[in-house]
């Protein structure tokens, strides 16, 4: 938050509500809150007080030009958001923490090969304590539809091997 003092933060309203609910459960049910940092909720309250928190109740188109937010309830978390970025060239990219395992994505695309994996290729969900595998698979399918089933156009932001699939490229053109 401090690194971006003018930024607005978008969080699904349900994410906050269900996180507080999970933290209020009896000790024997704390598994549902095992991935929640109460400090994040405190930071959210600070952002709200500063007028920098936007609660997302439903999918939002053009949060910024060409950038849409989609709610994926009970997937990676109680209400994960995934981001669709529409490019000038007409394609889309999707970014999410509720994406499939990177093992389902191509790691290298050989010259001349069709870079589009088959739409019927299996989806391997990653799960969290609050996840519904059905919702996760359905949200993943929506992401895939948004990018024309080109898995290389989905950026799984929490994946450890992200840099292997999307290597950093430094351009001489500058920032």
Image: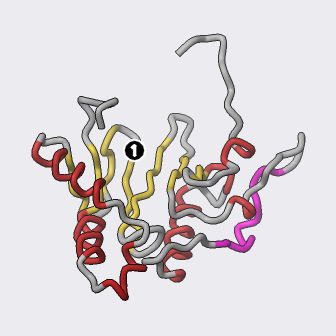
Provide the residue span drawn in magenta.
Answer: 114-124
Q: Nearer the viewer, residue 85 or 4?
A: 4
Tag 1 secondary structure: strand
What residue is shown at x 27% (from left), y 35% (from top)? 7
**Residue 100, how many percent across, how many down?**
62, 65
What residue is shown at x 50% (from left), y 56% (from top)? 96
**Would residue 126 be counted in the magenta stretch?**
no
Q: Nearer the viewer, residue 149 or 51?
A: 51
Above or below: residue 24 compared with residue 162? below
Q: Quadrant of residue 106?
A: bottom right
**Residue 109, how many percent across, how many down?**
83, 46
Q: Which residue is mark 1?
A: 67
The dominant secondary structure in magenta is loop
**Residue 168, how many percent across, how many down?**
67, 31
What residue is shown at x 29% (from left), y 32% (from top)? 2
Question: Is residue 55 left or right of 172 when viewed as pictured?
Answer: left
Question: Is residue 11 left or right of 47 when viewed as pictured?
Answer: right
Q: Residues within 10 Å of mark 1 (few under 14, many from 20)?
A: some
Q: Residue furthest top?
A: 173
Q: Quadrant of residue 79?
A: bottom left
Q: Quadrant of residue 126?
A: bottom right
Scheme of image coloration: secondary structure
Q: Nearer the viewer, residue 1 or 52?
A: 1
What residue is shown at x 12% (from left), y 40% (from top)? 50
């Amino acid at each position: 938050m401090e690194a971006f003092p003018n930024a607005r933060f978008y969080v699904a309203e349900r994410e906050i509500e269900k996180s507080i609910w999970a933290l209020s459960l009896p000790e024997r049910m704390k598994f549902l809150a095992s991935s929640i940092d109460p400090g994040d909720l405190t930071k959210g309250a600070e952002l709200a007080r500063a007028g920098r928190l936007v609660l997302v109740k439903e999918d939002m188109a053009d949060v910024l030009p060409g950038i849409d937010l989609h709610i994926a309830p009970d997937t990676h978390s109680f209400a994960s958001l995934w981001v669709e970025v529409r490019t000038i060239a007409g394609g889309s990219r999707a970014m999410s923490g509720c994406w499939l395992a990177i093992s389902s994505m191509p790691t290298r695309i050989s010259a001349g090969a069709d870079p589009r994996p088959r739409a019927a290729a299996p989806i391997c969900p990653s799960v969290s304590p609050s996840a519904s595998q059905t919702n996760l698979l359905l949200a993943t399918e929506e992401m895939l539809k948004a990018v024309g089933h080109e898995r290389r156009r989905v950026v799984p932001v929490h994946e450890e091997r992200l840099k292997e699939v999307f290597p950093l490229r430094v351009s001489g053109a500058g920032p």
